[in-house]
Image: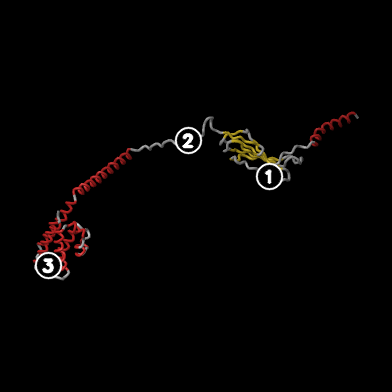
Amino acid sequence: MKRTWSSLVVVVVALAPGACRRAAPQRAPRPGGAVTLPDGSVEFGRAFPLTFTRVVRRGATAEPEPSLAPLTTRLEATTTWSGDDDVPEVPEVMEERRYLAWAFALGAVELPDATLHVTSSLPDGDAGRPELPEELLELPRSDRTTWIVALAAAIGAALLGLAVRRVRRRASAGRSAAPSAERISADARARARLQQLRRRPLDDGAAVLALHDEASELLRDYLGERFEPRAPARTSEELLEDAALERAIGATPRRRLVALLPPLDRVRFGRGRALPAAALQLLDELESFVGETSS
């Protein structure tokens, strides 16, 4: 009888802790998720580990994972495990995600169930000024490149010297040709043409008419070079009525111009007879006009 009671007592004592443990309700994990940091202070721009734990209750819809912004994260590993199916208060699934994170904002960063303090990664006293690039180094040149550059420079200098010499030559030629020389040149051309006209035979009427035409052209060309550039295209009446031309040539040469232009026009346009003696006299008047206006 004593052995029976003692065995019963042993059984009761062995079952008592389990009954007490089963009777006491377990504390249920908080739903949602939480962030775990190894340290509450990290440096700007440097990687640090971050763990996010999410808890899902049996029969409930999993809440979305909260944003970890403004952190930049990279998922390293994910671990999941199941709770005790016999205890309703224990979550069905627990998920742990381990990240490598970077913070790019100084100061306090609020995260789920945690506050992160971001400090500067620069040494004390460093103002964080940007480093400016140094001066670029010149590329080493080969001997061949040096000779090519030198040859090109020599050719360019030679061409420049020739161009300068040509410009100076033209400038000196222009300075030597004064207005008086230009007038002498016009006079010389007019006298040379007159000599050619005098050597022509006047044995028929056609030759006399041709002489009048060329004498009129000579006179207008001379006036155009010396006094009035538009003289070759103007009529005799326009030339005789031009007051500026009259002042330029003077009174006596103008009287000769009056004695030259109308007779030339009468013969050229068929309103007068073309006599060889009259043609030679017109050449004399023309030569006198050139001589009086040549200086």
Determine whether label 2 and label 3 are within 8 Å by CB.
no
Q: Where is 13 relative to 277, above or below?
A: above
Q: Secondary structure at mark 3?
A: helix
Q: Which residue is mark 1?
A: 63
Q: CA distance from mark 2 to mark 1?
A: 47 Å
Nearer the N terminus, badge 2 or badge 1?
1
Q: Is residue 214 visible?
A: no
State the image coordinates of residue 62 (x, y, percent, origin top left).
69, 45
Q: Is residue 33 left or right of residue 159?
A: right
**Nearer mark to the viewer, of 2 and 3:** 3
Q: Where is 290 relative to 12, above or below?
A: below
Using the image, tell me which numbered label, if any, was put on residue 208. 3
The amino acid on which the numbered mark 2 sits, given as a three-letter code, is Glu
Q: Is residue 139 left or right of residue 192?
A: right
Q: CA distance from mark 2 to mark 3?
A: 97 Å
Q: Which residue is mark 2?
A: 131
Nearer the N terminus, badge 3 or badge 1?
1
State the image coordinates of residue 3 (x, y, percent, origin top left).
88, 29
The amino acid on which the numbered mark 1 sits, given as a three-letter code, is Glu
Nearer the N terminus, badge 2 or badge 3?
2
| In front of the other: 30 or 244 | 244
The quarter holding residue 58 reads: top right
Residue at position x 57%, y 38% from top? 105
Q: CA distance from mark 3 to mark 1?
A: 125 Å
